Image (cartoon, rainbow, N blue to C red):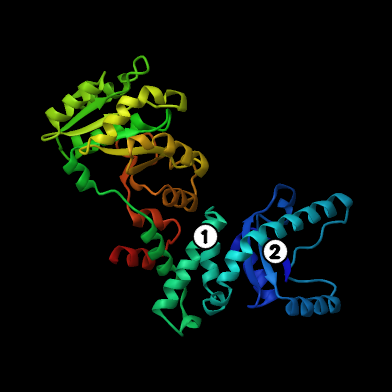
Amino acid sequence: MRIKSYFAESVQIAIERARLELGPEAMLMNSKRTEKDLKHLGEFEVIFGVPHRLAVKLNRSAESSKTSPVEAPEPPSSLAHELADLRRQIENMRDSVASQGRLSGRGSMRHLIPLIEDAYSELTSQEMSDEMTAEIVDAVERRISSSEPGGQQSVSAQRVEEALAEELADRLSVFSESRALKERAIMLVGPAGVGKTTTLAKLALRYGIQSRTPVQVLSADTLRVGGWEPLGTYARIAGLPFQAIESVAMLHKAIHEHSGNRLLLIDTPGFSGADMADAEELTNFASRESRVEVHLVLPANIGFKTALRVRERFAGFKPAHLVLTHLDDGCSPGAVLELTIRLGLSVSYLCSGQQIPDDLAIASKEAMIDGLCPRGEAIAAVSAA
């Protein structure tokens, strides 16, 4: 098999160029942003695998024509450019070997559902990893094939998008607000600087003012000098009851006194890895108190490996939910969706700015999938499921 790259300002344009030259038999193997030293060729690179017999035909065709209307013109030859091109080809081959196993497994089905490649490109263009994208697209193909045996050639773009939305919805878990209000206690945990206190202030105003739910605001952030003061200020301005909690015994008492008639909103310190010894008592309380819903707060632009380390650090709290903050910091929908799927926590609240309480929303599958499946039909299919 011959490996060939196409460059363009969008993944879709590059695919169209490749299809025009290579035809339907070529296999899309990878798509990614172009490396820095090759940016002059185009913003995106898509890599196709060309079967040997097709490559021979292409070579013969190239010999009969000195120029190709679908490929970018070659820059002036130089040793530096040739070396850069050689390095790129080697890296592409290495990446393709890793991904070819995944792709070849669905190669026969790919020809049955040609539009499935559009779904693949859509996900990768939104910065979902190749590994996660291949896994999801495989599942989408199986979903369509099981529901439409023998008719895959005529599958519409709308059906592919609906199947993609259905698959993503099945992989996502979202928070049940009614259950939290029934349990009567929400605790936010996470590292320093991720937006816990601001998020808790938003929740206090959402429930205490907008929904007129009796609320008790608690802050266990006593590790820092004055750590509880910002939240106390928010509560005082809003006219909501507030208490600084200095010990786990006080927290037990507050739960006992208020959990039957007030919604408790509990802020905690931003524990670093070095601070976890100080968190032991609070961790034991959270893991044993069944009336408390623990939410891990993370910025949406955090890398997955870092997020995984943070989740492990706070595993003792037994968080069941995930609050995503900083969604206004240029986060790509595909990367955010992959983060939530891989962490395995139900998403509860989405925070997109500092405005209190406006920049907070209850997480929904429809809203999170909409960035990847913008067509109304796809979202409607998820909503009706």
Left-right relation of 276 to 363: right
Residue 182 picture location, percent across and down = 16, 43
Answer few, some or many: residues within 10 Å of disc 2's Cα (few below 14, many 20 plus, some between 14 and 19). Answer: many
Between marks 1 and 2 in the image, the one whose residue lies nearer the viewer: 1
User: Which quadrant of the figure has residue 295?
Assistant: top left
Q: Residue 133 carries which label?
A: 1
Q: Which of marks 1 and 2 is nearer the N terminus?
A: 2
Residue 2 picture location, percent across and down = 74, 69
User: Foreground: 344 or 126?
Assistant: 344
User: Foreground: 76 or 304?
Assistant: 304
Left-right relation of 313 to 317: right
Identity of the amino acid at label 1? Answer: Thr
Residue 371 picture location, percent across and down = 44, 56
Image quadrant occupied by the C terminus = bottom left
Under circle 1, the secondary element is helix
Answer few, some or many: residues within 10 Å of disc 1's Cα (few below 14, many 20 plus, some between 14 and 19). Answer: many
How many numbered badges does the structure rendering display? 2
Rounded to the nearest whole Å, what is the CA distance between mark 1 and mark 2? 20 Å
Give the vertical position of 107 relative to 383 (above or below). below
Identity of the amino acid at label 2? Answer: Tyr
Left-right relation of 270 to 282: right
Left-right relation of 179 to 159: left
Image quadrant occupied by the N terminus = bottom right
Residue 344 picture location, percent across and down = 39, 49
Give the vertical position of 135 relative to 330 (above or below). below
Give the vertical position of 186 relative to 361 (above or below). above
**Residue at screen point 81% across, 61% down:** 74
**Residue at screen point 86% across, 56% down:** 76
**Residue at screen point 42% across, 33% down:** 194
Q: Mark 2 points at which residue?
A: 6
**One can see residue 350 in this view:** no
Under circle 2, the secondary element is strand
